[in-house]
C-alpha cells in the first residue's frame, strides 16, 4: 500500500480525531454527568482537554518525524562533506598526476629537441662524409693516374722520339735529294701533326702527376689572369666580350705561379670554347677573410646535370678529336687541390657556366 | 778547325742512331749506350765540347752521370734529355749551373742543334 505523505496523514488524523471527538464527547459527558451545571462546566474542559491531548499527540508525532528528517539531513550533510573531501582528494591526486604528466611531457620535449639536433648533426656529418668520399675517390683516381702516367710517359716519349728523329732524317734526305712532291709533303706533315698531338697529351699527363713543386711563391692573381687571357688569345674569338670585375686592390696569394697560370688558362679556354655565336665571359675577383675568390662566368652552351660530375675526370671531353684532350679540368682540379683550394661549377644548359675558384690567401 | 765533338748518352739504341745520323754532317758525334761507356769516351776524348745525356737510364741517372763526368772534364757544356717532366734533381742541377738546359723528349733535333751552335760560339768567344 502506498504510504500517505506526512502532511496528508496528519491532516487526516486531525480530521478523524476531531470528528470522533465532536460525535462522541457530548455522549460521553451525558453518561458521566446528569446535572446541567456540571455538564456545562465540563463542556468547557472538554475543549481544553481536546486541545491539550491533540497538542501532545502532535508534539510526539511531529517530533518523531522531525528527528527522522534531521537524521537524514545530518546524514546527507555528512555524506556531502565526505563527498567534498573525496572530490578534494581526487582533485589533488589529479593535479599531481597532471603535474607529473607535464613534467614528463617537458622531458619528452627536451629529448625530442636533442634527437632533432642529433638528427641534423647526423645529416650534416653524412653530407660531409659523402663529400669527403667523393674527394677521396678523386684523389685516389689522380694518384693512380699519376703513377701510371709517370711510367707511360717515359715509355711513350722514347718511341715518339724515334719517330721524330726518323722524320727529321727523312726531311733532310728529301730536301737534299731535291724531291718535290705534294704527297710527300702531306705524309711528312701528317707524321709531324701526329707526334705533336701525342706529345701534347703526354705533356698534359705529366702535369697531372707532378706534385712536388713550390707552393709558396707570391702570386699576383690579377697579373696571372691577365697573362692567362693573353695566352688564350688563340681561342678568343671577336664575338666574345670579356668583362673584368676585379677587386680594386691587388690580390697576392701563396701558390705556384706556373700552375696557377695553367688553372686560369684552362678555365678561360673552356669558357671561350663554350661560346658559339656571341657571348660574354665575366671574370670576378674578391677576397673574403683568408680566401681569394675568382669566378669565371660564361654565357656559353652550359653543361647538363648528369655530365657535371664527370667533367673533372681525366680524358672526359665533348670536344671534337684534336680539339680537347679532356685533361684540362682534371689538371686544374688537381692543382687547386694541391693549393688547398676548391673548384665549383654551376651550370644551366644553353645559359652558361659559372666556375668558382677559392684559394687560401694567407701566407704561412 | 775540325768538327766539334759531341757525346750523346742514351740507353735506347735507336735514339743514338738517329741522333748520330741527323747530326753527323755538322758534328763529330760520339755515342754511348750507358753512362760507363760515356765516362770512358770523356776520359779518352778531352776535346769533347758538348755532352747530351738522357735522364732515365738503368744503374745511373743522367744527372749522376754528369756529376761524375764533370770530375773528368769541367769545360764541357752539359744537357739533359727527359721523357718526363722536370724533376727536383734536374731543377737543382739547373740552379747550380751543372747543366745548361734540359730538353723534353720527343726532342726537336734542330732545336738541340741551334743550342749547341750557341754554346760553341760562346765557347770560342771566351777563348779569344
Ligand atoms: N665553361 C664550360 N662550358 C661548357 N662546358 C664546359 C665548360 N668547361 C668544361 N666543359 C665541359 O667539360 C669537358 C671537359 O673539360 P676539360 O677542360 O677537362 O677538357 P677539354 O676542354 O675538353 O679538353 P682540354 O682542356 O684538354 O683541351 C669539356 O669537353 C666540356 O664538355
Ligand atoms: Mg679544357
Image: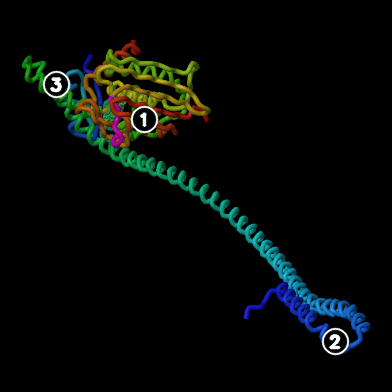
Numbered disc 1: what chain?
A
Rendered position, A179 above or below A116: above
Q: Which residue is mark 1?
A: A346
Badge 1 density bin: few <14, some 14–19, many ≥20, Cα 10 Å: some
Labels 3, 2: front one: 2
Q: Is the image coloured rainbow, by chain, by secondary structure, or in one colour?
A: rainbow
Disc 1 is placed on an element classified as strand
Proximity of marks 3 and 1: CB atoms separated by less than 8 Å: no
Task: Give the residue at mark 3.
Answer: A189
Residue at 44%, 34% in the rendered image: A340
Q: In the rendered structure, find residue A30 and report the number of the disc placed on it.
A: 2
Q: Label for residue B5?
A: none
Percent across and percent down for residue A362 are 51, 28
User: Ligand 1 appears in which quadrant?
Assistant: top left
Q: Is residue B53 among what the camera can see?
A: no
Q: Which residues are magenta?
A: A301-307
- The residue depicted at 45 percent of the width and 23 percent of the height is A219
Left or right: A234 with respect to A256? Answer: left
Amino acid at each position: 500500500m502506498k504510504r500517505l505523505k506526512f502532511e496528508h496523514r496528519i491532516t487526516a488524523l486531525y480530521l478523524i480525531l476531531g470528528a470522533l471527538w465532536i460525535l462522541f464527547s457530548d455522549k460521553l459527558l451525558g453518561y458521566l454527568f446528569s446535572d446541567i451545571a456540571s455538564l456545562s462546566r465540563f463542556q468547557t474542559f472538554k475543549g481544553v482537554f481536546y486541545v491539550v491531548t491533540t497538542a501532545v499527540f502532535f508534539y510526539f508525532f511531529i517530533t518523531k518525524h522531525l528527528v527522522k528528517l534531521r537524521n537524514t539531513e545530518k546524514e546527507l550533510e555528512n555524506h556531502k562533506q565526505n563527498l567534498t573531501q573525496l572530490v578534494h582528494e581526487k582533485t589533488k591526486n589529479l593535479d599531481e598526476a597532471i603535474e607529473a604528466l607535464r613534467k614528463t611531457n617537458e622531458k619528452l620535449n627536451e629529448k625530442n629537441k636533442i634527437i632533432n639536433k642529433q638528427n641534423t648533426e647526423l645529416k650534416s656529418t653524412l653530407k660531409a662524409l659523402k663529400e669527403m668520399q667523393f674527394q677521396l675517390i678523386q684523389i685516389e683516381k689522380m694518384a693512380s693516374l699519376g703513377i701510371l702516367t709517370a711510367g707511360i710517359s717515359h715509355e711513350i716519349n722514347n718511341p715518339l722520339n724515334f719517330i721524330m728523329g726518323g722524320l727529321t732524317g727523312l726531311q733532310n734526305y728529301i730536301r737534299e735529294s731535291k724531291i718535290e712532291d705534294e704527297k710527300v709533303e702531306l705524309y711528312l706533315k701528317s707524321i709531324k701533326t701526329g707526334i705533336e698531338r701525342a706529345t701534347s697529351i703526354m705533356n698534359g699527363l705529366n702535369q697531372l702527376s707532378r706534385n712536388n713543386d713550390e707552393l709558396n711563391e707570391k702570386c699576383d692573381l690579377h697579373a696571372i689572369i691577365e697573362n692567362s687571357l693573353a695566352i688564350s688569345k688563340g681561342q678568343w674569338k671577336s664575338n666574345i666580350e670579356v668583362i673584368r670585375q676585379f677587386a680594386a686592390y691587388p690580390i697576392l696569394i701563396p701558390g705556384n705561379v706556373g700552375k696557377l697560370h695553367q688553372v686560369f688558362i684552362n678555365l678561360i679556354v673552356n669558357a671561350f670554347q663554350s661560346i658559339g655565336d656571341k657571348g660574354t665571359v665575366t671574370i670576378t675577383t674578391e677576397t673574403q677573410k683568408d680566401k681569394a675568390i675568382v669566378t669565371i662566368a660564361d654565357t656559353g652552351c652550359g653543361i647538363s646535370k648528369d655530365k657535371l660530375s664527370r667533367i673533372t675526370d681525366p680524358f672526359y671531353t665533348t670536344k671534337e678529336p684534336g680539339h680537347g684532350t679532356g685533361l684540362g679540368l682534371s689538371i686544374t682540379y688537381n692543382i687547386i687541390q694541391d693549393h688547398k683550394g676548391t673548384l665549383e661549377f654551376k651550370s644551366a644548359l644553353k645559359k652558361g657556366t659559372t666556375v668558382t675558384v677559392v684559394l687560401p690567401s694567407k701566407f704561412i | 778547325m775540325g768538327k766539334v765533338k759531341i757525346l750523346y748518352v742514351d740507353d735506347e739504341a735507336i735514339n743514338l742512331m738517329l741522333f748520330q745520323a741527323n747530326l753527323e754532317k755538322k758534328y763529330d758525334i760520339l755515342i754511348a749506350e750507358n753512362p760507363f761507356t760515356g765516362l770512358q769516351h770523356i776520359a779518352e776524348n778531352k776535346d769533347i765540347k758538348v755532352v747530351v745525356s738522357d735522364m732515365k737510364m738503368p744503374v745511373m741517372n743522367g744527372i749522376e752521370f754528369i756529376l761524375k763526368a764533370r770530375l773528368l772534364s769541367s769545360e764541357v757544356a752539359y744537357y739533359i734529355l727527359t721523357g718526363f717532366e722536370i724533376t727536383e734533381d734536374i731543377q737543382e742541377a739547373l740552379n747550380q749551373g751543372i747543366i745548361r738546359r734540359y730538353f723534353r723528349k720527343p726532342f726537336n733535333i734542330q732545336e738541340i742543334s741551334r743550342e749547341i751552335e750557341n754554346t760553341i760560339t760562346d765557347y770560342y768567344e771566351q777563348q779569344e
